[in-house]
Image (cartoon, grey):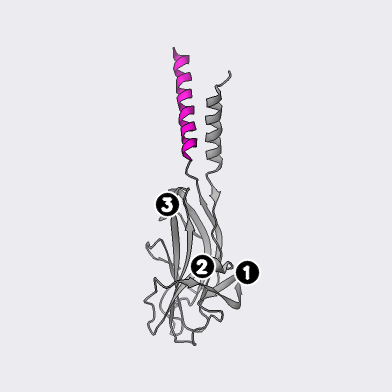
């Protein structure tokens, strides 16, 4: 049986939509310094407050690399005057989901932070945390954070258009910083209006063929 050309186009469109559901989007590791912003607050407060304004491009810490990924801080030394000069950081990356479905977006990464909030006098009490688009703070967990931890999967909290993810890190003033290994950012494209029309047209053709066979 030969199918009408409209049906062939509709089926091809449906096939393309299925094949493109896992589009890979740009998301940078901390080796890409230009992708990261940092806001910094130097204070005597152990565990806050963390700055939410005054972001500038983060600096790569000279000579400090973990598993091939560079560390970032507010300066190239990663030092803010020595142990006891508590420094609160927010490291931010923004990314655009325009044209993609926020509801089925998934981000995977590994990260590290210095210091680690081990309830030790010179390492502070703040456990590093991250937040997507100003949502709930997600803690690192327990134990030292100086090396990359397990893979973190984020699959909710995304919005249409511009998104941002923030990492809240406390430094003790000596070897401060943050590192991230980006693994993937995937989302399905939102069908273009023309594609939707073709799909609807294909459905109409299928419905007509079914009615014709039933007559």
Bounds of the magenta span?
192-215
Quadrant the N terminus occupies: top right
The residue that appears at 56% across and 41% down in the rendered structure is: 19
The secondary structure type at the circle numbered 2 is loop
Residue 199 x, y percent position in the rendering:
48, 32
Q: Is residue 170 above or below residue 4?
A: below
Contact flag, marks 3 and 2 (Cβ < 8 Å)? no
Q: Nearer the viewer, mark 3 or mark 1?
A: 3
| Mark 3 element type | loop
Which residue is identified by label 1? Answer: 68
- Which is more toward the observer, 29 or 156? 29
Q: Is residue 137 above or below residue 207?
A: below
User: Of callouts 3 and 1, which one flags the residue occurring earlier in the amino acid sequence?
Assistant: 1
Quarter of the figure with residue 43? bottom left
Q: Nearer the viewer, residue 1 or 193?
A: 193
Q: Which mark is residue 127?
A: none
Q: Please rate how many residues cluster around mark 2, counting C-alpha atoms within 10 Å: few if below 14, some from 14 to 19, many from 20.
A: many
Q: Which residue is mark 2?
A: 36
Q: Quadrant of the C terminus?
A: top left
Name the residue beneath numbered marker 3. Answer: 160
Mark 1 falls on what kind of element? loop
Q: Cα distance, mark 1 to mark 2?
A: 17 Å
Majority SS type along the magenta span: helix
Query: From the viewer's perspective, is residue 173 above or below residue 182?
Result: below
Instruction: Calculate the distance from the C-alpha at mark 3 to the C-alpha at mark 1.
Output: 32 Å
Label 3: how many Cα within 10 Å (few below 14, some 14–19, many 20+):
few
Query: Residue 32, image x and y in percent?
Result: 58, 66
Q: Residue at coordinates 63% horizontally, 69% vertically from top-left?
A: 68
Whether residue 151 can be seen here: no
Relative depth, front residue between 81 and 52: 52
Q: Nearer the viewer, mark 1 or mark 2?
A: 2
- Circles 3 and 1, Cβ within 8 Å, touching? The answer is no
């Amino acid at each position: 049986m030969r199918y009408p050309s409209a049906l062939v186009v509709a089926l091809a469109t449906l096939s393309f939509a299925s094949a493109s559901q896992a589009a890979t989007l740009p998301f940078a590791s901390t080796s890409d310094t230009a992708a990261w912003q940092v806001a910094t607050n130097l204070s005597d407060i152990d565990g806050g407050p963390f700055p939410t304004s005054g972001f500038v491009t983060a600096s790569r810490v000279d000579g400090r690399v973990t598993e091939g990924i560079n560390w970032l801080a507010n300066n190239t030394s990663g030092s803010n005057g020595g142990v006891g000069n508590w420094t609160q950081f927010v490291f931010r990356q923004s990314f655009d989901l325009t044209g993609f479905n926020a509801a089925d977006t998934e981000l995977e990464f590994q990260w590290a932070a210095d210091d680690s909030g081990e309830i030790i006098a010179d390492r502070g009490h703040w456990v590093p945390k991250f937040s997507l688009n100003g949502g709930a703070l997600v803690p690192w967990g327990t134990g030292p954070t100086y090396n990359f931890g397990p893979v973190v999967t984020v699959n909710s909290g995304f919005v249409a258009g511009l998104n941002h993810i923030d990492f809240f890190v406390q430094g003790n003033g000596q070897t401060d910083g943050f590192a991230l290994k980006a693994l993937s950012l995937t989302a399905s494209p939102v069908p273009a209006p023309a594609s939707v029309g073709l799909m609807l047209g294909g459905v109409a053709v299928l419905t007509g063929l079914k009615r014709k066979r039933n007559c």
